[in-house]
Amino acid sequence: MTVVPKTPDSAAVTDVDEPDPADGSVLVDGLLLGICGTDVEIAAGDFGSGRGGSDWMVLGHESLGRVVSAPPGSGFAAGDLVAGVVRRPDPEPCPACARGDWDFCRNGRYTERGIKEADGYGAQQWRVDPYFAVKVPPELGRLGVLTEPASILTKAWEQVDQVGARSWFEPEHVLVTGAGPIGLMAALIAQQRGYYVHVLDRATDGPKPQLVKDLGGEYLNDLSDLKVVPDVVIEATGNGKLVLDCAGLLGPGGIMCLTGISPGTDTIDAAMDPLTRQLVVRNAAIVGSVNAGKRHYAQAVDVLAAADPQWLGRLITRTVSLERWTEALEKGPDDIKVVVDLSGESRPKS
């Protein structure tokens, strides 16, 4: 699965060389590759950069593969299911990267598989350093492709917990904005924690409303229908107006974690002085969260393993073959998570 970075309409199926041993000592057969909005934007030519000296880049960062070979002492063996970590620290680590917090890189010189200066996991075979591989339990099977998106939310919830620890913090009501894969993962974790879950999304039919209801949550199409004061908001749309509206709903000590990024450039008029006053007097906090560290991948595996596998399986709404992978870039009306079958083991679905 290749693109020419910053070149629209360059997405293609390409024969490439064997994976570079410099990418890692663990050789992996690619099984599934999840597609997200970042991949769509890279394929549209909006951003992205390949490894030095190459005109093209292997796309894909939501990985699931099966180990072909691994060195002794690596912690991996042939047949293991694995997901690859996306981000790598910069070559001369900043203080955050040096301690393993590359998701908090201070100088921007990190690399990211399939996004920034490194080939991704969208290939029939790939390599990974053992440190940047996460073992997926065999009972998860193909659902292990959800590990990377789930890691985004385990980090986001960690951020909420860390901010909440500034004082007494026992949240009850959680509002999630957006019922895509990220929003539904946020709702799943909230449900696993025993919180009351409220999910806002524009879709009025399709699978989203029932998925939320099956978590025991409330599904909303309009923010005015929310009848409680949220203790936590997980914002997964990136819509600026919605961010401001939700900020105004936060109760005392409330926390909003921003996980969504909008590709738009809309501007809005906002009465910021009253909102700022409200945030200050309520000790409310807004924090952004991007990417994930290695521990968040391990936590994501735990979240997935604890979930109802039938519910998780309904998040994967379409599977396309490697030969037709560009079809995954076009989102259908009922799509939640579209995945590419890299191996031919999963029957393509229309």
Image (cartoon, rainbow, N blue to C red):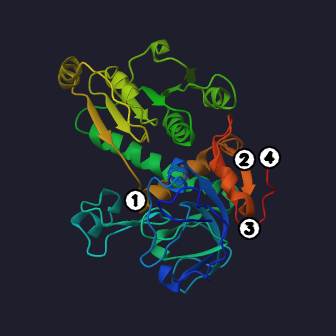
State the residue position of label 3: 343
Which x, y percent locates residue 2? Answer: 59, 66
Real-space CA distance between mark 4 and mark 2, rounded to the nearest whole angstrom? 7 Å
Q: Amino acid at mark 1?
A: Gly
Real-space CA distance between mark 1 and mark 4, rounded to the nearest whole angstrom? 35 Å
Tag on residue 318? 2
State the residue position of label 4: 350
**Is 271 above or below relative to 162?**
above
Along the line of sight, the residue nearer the viewer: 222 or 271:
271
Mark 4 or 2 closer to N-term? 2
Real-space CA distance between mark 4 and mark 3, rounded to the nearest whole angstrom? 17 Å
State the residue position of label 1: 293
Along the line of sight, the residue nearer the viewer: 348 or 66:
348
Mark 2 or 3 closer to N-term? 2
Which x, y percent locates residue 27? Answer: 60, 79
**Of the two numbered discs 1 and 2 in the rendering, the one whose residue sits closer to the viewer:** 2
Taking the image as drawn, is residue 214 in sight? yes
